[in-house]
Image: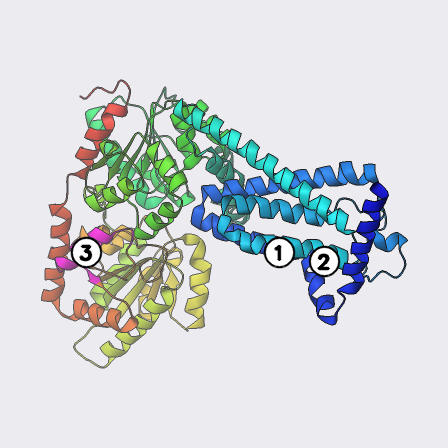
Amino acid sequence: MLDRLLELDLSLFYLINHGLKSPLLDKVMPYFSDFGFFILPLVIFGVFALYKWRLKALWIMLIVGAAVGLADTISFYGLKSTIARPRPYHILENVNVLKQWGYSSSFSFPSSHSANIFAIAAVLGWFYPKTTFILIPTAIMVALSRVYGGVHYPLDTLGGALLGMVCAGMAISFSSALKTKWEDMKIKGKVTGDEGYFILYTLLAPLALFYYIPKLIKEKEGRENFRERFGDIDIASNINVSLEKPLWLHAASVGEVMVAKTLIETIKEKTPDLPIFLTVNTPAGRSIAEKSLPDIPVAYFPFDFPWAVKRALRRVSPMAVVFIEAEIWPNFIRIAKNLEIPTVLVNGRMSESTHRSFKRLNSFAGGVLSRLSAIVSQSDGYRERYLDLGCLPKNVFVSGNIKYDMVYEHGQLKGDIKKFISNIKGNIKRKVFLAGSTRRGEEEIVLDAFSQLKELCGKSTSQFPPFLILAPRHLNRIEEVESLLKRVGAKYIKRSDLAGGSAGAITKDVDILLLDTIGELPMLMAVADVVFIGGSLVKGIGGHNVLEPAAVRRAPIFGPYMDNFPEISKDLINAGGGFVVASVDEMVEIARKLMVDENFATKAGEGAYFVVEKNRGATAKCVEILLPFVDGAVEK
C-alpha cells in the first residue's frame, strides 16, 4: 500500500515537474516559491488591518504567528528528521530545477512552505471569510511551485497543507479559549481589556531615549539631575526639607510652570500647610520653576517606564498627582490608579489633531483617560472631546483657562538692557517689533517682514524705523538662528553681549537684538510697539501664549495655526485685540498699522486687555474641584 502511494506520488511529481513545464511557468513559479511572495503581502495586510481594525487585527496577527511557529516547529524539529525523506533533486535524475535551492542537508517531508501558507490562509480565512477566494488559490500555487521547482514531492506539499491547517485550528481553538477566559476576567474586574496596548506602549517607550541622548551630549542642563528621569527623585535634596505625602504637580515646560505657579498660589491661600512637589520635562521649565517658586521642591518627571514610575511614586509617595494641560503619561496614570493614588488633569486641552489621533487609538487612549480621577478642561469644546473618547460625564468638569488668571510679572527692565532699549525708543526713536517664541521656519518670515518694514519706513520721513527683537522659543537654537542672521547680512547683537557701558554706544549700529536669555521676554513685551507670538506660522506646534502681551495691552499678531489656543485667539480677534496673519505681506500690513497709527494700536491693546479681564476666575473653580482629591486638606 505504501509502495503504491509512493509510486503515485512519483508519477504526479513527474507530471507536474515535466508535464506542465513551460517558459511562462518557469518565470512565474519561482515567485510563488519565494517566502517573500506571501510574507510581504501579509505585512502589508497586517499594517492595513492594524490601522483599520486595531486590537482585533493585532490579535489575529498573533494567532497567525502562533500557527506558523507551531507548524515550523513540528515540521523542522519533528517530522522532517523522523521521516528523513530526501528531496527529489537530491536523488532523482532528470529533475527540472528552477534555481539552486541550497537545501543540502534538509529533508523533504513535509513541505514547510506549504505548511506555512496554508496555516496563514486558514487563520485569515477563518476571521475574514471574504478573503478565501484569494488565499486558497494562492496557497495551492505555492504548493505546486515547490513540486514544479523540483524541491518537493506532491505528497510533501499535501502533508504540509494538512499540518498547516491543523496548526491553524489549534491556534484558533487556543485563542478562542483564551478570549473566553479574558472576557470572564474582565467581567470579574481582574483585567481592563487594554493590557495588550500597554505592553506594546511599554515596549516602544524606550525609543524616547533616542530623543534625549543627543540632548545629553549637547546640553549641560540636560545632563544635570538626569537620574531623576529614571525615578531616582530626592525631594529633600532640592530645598533641604522633607515632604510627607505631598500634592504632586507636573508641568511640561515654561508655559505650564506659570500655570502651576498660579494654581499653587491659590491652593496655598486655602491650605497653607499642604506640602507641594513640582516636576517638569525641560531644563528651561526647571530654571523658571526654581526662580519663581523658591519654596517648592522641583525635579524632572520620570520617563514613562513602569519601573521608573514605580520608583518615583515610591520615593515621593504623593497624596494625589495633578497634570497640567496636555500631559498624558499612560504608564504613570495606570500605575497610580493601581496604587489608588488620585490623578487629575487640570486646565485640560485637546487639539483637534490630537483628538483625531486618540480616536484612532480609542481602545488605548480612552482607557488611559478614563483612569484619571477627574479632568478639569478649559472649555465646553474640550470637554466634549474628552467625553467622545469615553470619559464619564461626572468626571469631566469645565473651569475656564487658568492662563487668564496668571499674574504676568512683566516687571521693569534693569541695567544694560534697560539702557539699550531706552536708547532705541528714546534717543533714536525706533519702533520695537518683538517676535517672541519663534520656531524653526518662522524666523525667515519675520526677517522678511522686518526688511520690508524698514524699506517702507525709509521712504517716509514721518515714520520711525523699526527695530527687531528676535526671541527663539528654545535657547538651543540660538546658534542656528545666529547663522541665519549672518547669512542674510543682518546687523544684530546678542542680549548676552550687552555688557556694562557699551550698551548705549552700539545701539546705532544694529537693527536686531537676538534674545539669548531666559526671563526677560515678558519685560520686553511691555515696551514693544508690535508683538508677534510664534509657534503659529508652522503646522504641528499649535501656537504659544498670546495672553502675555494682551495682559500689558499689546494686541498680539499670530499665525493661523493656534490649535493650543483656539478659543483665546478667537476671542482676541473678535474683540479687535488680536490679529491673525498667514503671509509676510499680511504681517507687514498689520505691523506697520500698529506702528504708525497710535489710536489704532491703543484701541487694539485695550481690546486685548478686555479679553483677559473678562475671563478671569478659572483658578478658583479648578481648586474647588481639586481639593476633594487632596487627602486631609483643610481650607484656611
Q: Going 71% across and 38% down the picture, which residue do you hit?
A: 73
User: As displayed, is residue 489 above or below residue 73?
Assistant: below
Horizontal arrangement in the rendering, residue 612 relative to residue 493 (left or right): left
Residue pictured at 26% horizontal, 74% vertical: 585
Residue 314 visible in the shown view: yes
Percent coordinates x, y for residue 349 in the rendering: 28, 44
Check residue 159 for magenta coloring: no
Which label's residue is closer to the chain start, 1 or 3? 1
Q: Nearer the viewer, residue 535 or 374?
A: 374
- Amino acid on which disc 2 is placed: Ser
Q: Amino acid at mark 1?
A: Thr
Q: Which residues are magenta?
A: 563-579
Q: With 142 as the anchor, is 383 left or right in this view?
A: left
Residue highlighted by disc 2 = 145
Q: Nearer the viewer, mark 2 or mark 3?
A: 2
Q: Are marks 1 and 3 in contact (CB under 8 Å)?
A: no
x, y (%) of residue 342? Answer: 33, 26
Q: Secondary structure at mark 2?
A: helix
Q: Residue at x 59, y 48 (%)?
A: 121
Return the residue found at the far bottom.
Answer: 459
Which labelled disc corresponds to residue 138? 1
Which residue in the structure is indicated by mark 3?
570
Judged from this view, the residue extending furthest toward the top is 632
